[in-house]
Image (cartoon, rainbow, N blue to C red):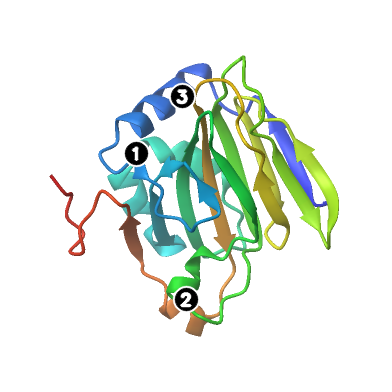
Amino acid sequence: MAYYQQHPTVFSRNYLEKLQSRILASPYLALNNLNRDFVATKGFSVVFRRSHLATVAEQFPVFQRYLEKALQPDCNAFYLNPLLLKAGSRVDPHIDRSLRSYCKTIQPPDWVSVLYVSVPDDLEGGELVLRSRQRTVGQIKPQANTLVLFQGDLTHSVTAVVKGGERLSLVCEQYSLDEKELDEIPAFKLESRALNRDGVLQK
């Protein structure tokens, strides 16, 4: 594969509408818990090993069909997060390594998958830019119901949203870890600014 793939029309309209509705209604959706590269965005994150896919499906049944389609067979650890942008939001250039908070020696993921759940018709900006060694290798205009899979070692960013409503995507970093690294990754863990230090929803 050459840096990335795009797969259009991967799900039914009914599934996308349900996915959008459940994410936006989630009590975990809050100011993003990701790093400072994610400017004025909202989301939450689910960390899990492949051995606990059933737990993810139990806690978030609406994610199951996405995971069945998106997860790569050679990967065993995942960082899944809905990502909500609106006018004024952007994501600055970075390389994903979100599991590093659990395993300091971890390398970038093998793959990153992005499903565009909803994209407003009047969206201006919000494009995914992929770079390899300072060279742009992809600039992807988001299209609802398109699944993008790109190499995890690419520097990537999302251009500032200038105009339009909410742009919602579902992102999954996919890692292939050795046994020692995998032991340091939670089997299942939810991350959200809506949770307190004990992992309980704040009132």
Q: Nearer the viewer, residue 167 or 150?
A: 167
Secondary element at tag 2 = helix
Q: Which residue shows up at 36% across the image and 30% down it? A: 24
The residue wearing badge 1 is 61
Other residues around mark 3 within 10 Å, as few (<14) / some (14–19) / many (≥20):
some
Which residue type carries mark 3? Tyr
Q: Position of residue 196 (x, y in %)?
A: 20, 58
Secondary element at tag 1 = helix
Which residue type carries mark 2? Leu
Q: CA distance from mark 2 to mark 1?
A: 24 Å
Secondary element at tag 3 = helix
Other residues around mark 2 within 10 Å, as few (<14) / some (14–19) / many (≥20):
some
Q: Which residue shows up at 54% across the image and 46% down it? A: 171
Between disc 1 and disc 3, whose residue precedes?
Answer: 3
Q: Residue furthest bottom?
A: 180
Q: Is residue 123 visible?
A: yes
Q: Nearer the viewer, residue 59 or 84?
A: 84
The residue wearing badge 2 is 182
Q: Position of residue 146 (x, y in %)?
A: 65, 30
Q: Position of residue 36 (x, y in %)?
A: 50, 56
Q: Which residue shows up at 50% across the image and 39% down it? A: 66
Please identify the quadrant where the C terminus is shown.
Answer: top left
Above/below status of 79 relative to 141: below
Q: How many marks?
A: 3
The residue wearing badge 3 is 15
Between disc 2 and disc 1, whose residue precedes?
Answer: 1
Left or right: 203 in relation to 43 = left
Q: CA distance from mark 3 to mark 2?
A: 32 Å
